[in-house]
Amino acid sequence: MEASNRTTPHPSTFILLGIPGLEAAHVWFSIPFCSVYILSLLGNGLLLAVIKTELSLHEPMYLFLSMLALADLVISTTTMPKTLCIFWFRDRDIHINACLAQIFLVHSLTTMESGFMLAMAFDRYVAICNPLRHSAILTNRAIAKIGLGVVMRGAVLLGPHPFLLKWLPYCRTNVISHTYCEFMVLVKLACADTTVMSAYSLAVSFLAGGLDFILIVLSYILILRAVFRLPSKETRRKSLGTCSSHVCVMLVFYTPAIFTYFSHRFGHVAPHIHILIANIYLLFPPMMNPIIYGVRTPGIRQRALHILGIKSA
């Protein structure tokens, strides 16, 4: 379908352009995109299998990690198959309902991922600052309630987004300069006053990711204060070592997330750079999370090698 600059106020179909200005290189972009996607599926699938079969990993930290891995699988699958169709087959059409479903899943799942990382930070805080009560505080029942609360928060906060976008008039164009549908991209296409909607999105972003990030930073300030009060250097090293994987995962997740958020609302970034960063935000963390924990956690690494039939050195 040819992209047009005129459309009905409520189009049934949008047109995803992929990476504008770099259409000739779409096939080349598909190689790293597809490779990272496959690695994400394999890595997170293996991580889930390891945590399920290894009884020693049935601890709060790894149960929250399995929730994060499941969210990673869904979020990468929400966008990447359509992106690859654009790159390989120039299949750019996307029905408005599929577009709105993408928006809901992408934003709700990233909110859930942020919540799971906060839960993991809380687990580290209790384990280091109040170790004697760790098992009493983070029981299986408490873990299930926290996980359900994180999922419900993401669904409730982001649930209104598709309905708000559904009835906006898009009388300028139905062309989306992106590889997948994003909330702010559609808001900018609308020919109506979207001030209230943008303010709502800003408030949701702060109540979810922003507040989570602040609480995670505060928890690690308390953790560091407790660690540096320990008398033994070896004990301090081991305590910090248990947090290092989580810190790496947070940096991988929040760095592109913060860049994407601010470039949408306040920045003037070249469109192709913004689109590439937005894709990295959805693809890179799901690939890196199992690698980080696999490399830094002996229990996960050894069990993964056993499942793959590889003898550890």
Image (cartoon, helix red, strand yellow):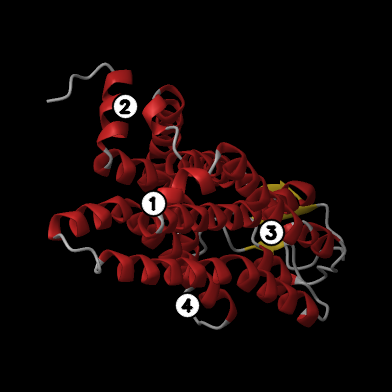
Q: Is residue 100 left or right of residue 206?
A: right
Give the foreground label among 4 and 1.
Answer: 1
Q: Can residue 146 be seen from the camera position used here?
A: yes
Spatial distance from mark 1 to mark 2, Cα to Cα? 28 Å
In the rendered image, residue 34, in percent from the top left (x then y), is placed at 42, 40
Spot occupied by residue 75 in the image (x, y as percentages of width and height): 56, 46
Q: Earlier in the sequence, mark 4 or mark 1?
A: 1
Q: Nearer the viewer, residue 99 or 199?
A: 199
N-terminal label among 4 and 3 = 3
Along the line of sight, the residue nearer the viewer: 234 or 209 = 234
Label 3's element?
loop
Give neighbour class at mark 2: few <14, some 14-19, many 20+ (Cα, 10 Å).
many
Q: Nearer the viewer, mark 4 or mark 3?
A: 4
Which residue corresponds to the image point at 67% horizontal and 55% vertical from the top-left? 154
Q: Are marks 3 and 1 in contact (CB under 8 Å)?
A: no
Mark 3 vs mark 1: give the one in front: 1
Q: Earlier in the sequence, mark 1 or mark 2?
A: 1
Label 2 is placed on what type of residue? Ala
Disc 4 is placed on an element classified as: loop
| Amino acid type, residue under disc 1 in the picture | Pro
